[in-house]
Amino acid sequence: MTSILRSPKALQLTLALIKPDAVAHPLILEAVHQQILSNKFLIVRMRELLWRKEDCQKFYKEHEGRFFYQRLVEFMASGPIRAYILAHKDAIQLWRTLMGPTRVFRARHMAPDSI
């Protein structure tokens, strides 16, 4: 971890939100946490949150009107989430790769190691 802090290249920050279904299962939550660590992310901050529906609507406002918006808002307000602020020299792209495709079928077949 010391080598990351001494790197001459600036670190990127990214927000990682772990959804309620993963937070509800301690083994899955721990596996996601270990994936974060094993991919050499620096955890700047970690916090469990319980968003109200209004919080979710505000956060996902850019998706308002899309077919999945209401379902997403209700799901994210259905239980606690874990929020991480992660740092890495290529944090945004690395986190997106680690998350894998948004469609479950594609994720299982194209990126089976994704979270």
Image (tube, rainbow, N blue to C red):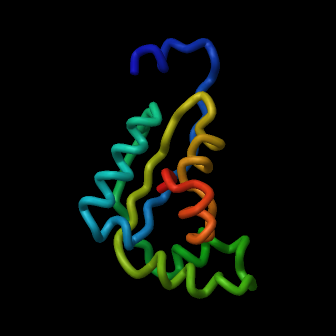
**Quadrant location of the N terminus in the rendered image:** top left
Residue at (59, 41) in percent of width and height: 94
- Image location (x, y in percent) of residue 46: 37, 48
What is the number of callouts on the image? 0
- Image location (x, y in percent) of residue 19: 44, 67
Please state which of residues 85 and 91 is positioned toward the viewer in this rendering: 91
Left or right of 62 in this view: 88: left
Please state which of residues 67 and 38 is positioned toward the viewer in this rendering: 38
Residue at (74, 82) in percent of width and height: 66
Residue 18 versus residue 2 in the image, above or below: below
Residue at (47, 56) in percent of width and height: 115
Q: Quadrant of residue 35?
A: top left
Residue 24 versus residue 84 in the image, above or below: below
Q: Residue furthest left?
A: 26
- Image location (x, y in percent) of residue 64: 71, 80
Residue at (56, 70) in percent of width and height: 104
Q: Quadrant of residue 61?
A: bottom right
Please state which of residues 91 and 45 is positioned toward the viewer in this rendering: 91
Q: Quadrant of residue 105?
A: bottom right
Left or right of 78 in this view: 103: right
Residue 95 versus residue 18 in the image, above or below: above
- Image location (x, y in percent) of residue 10: 63, 23
Residue 76 versus residue 87 in the image, above or below: below
Q: Residue furthest front?
A: 109
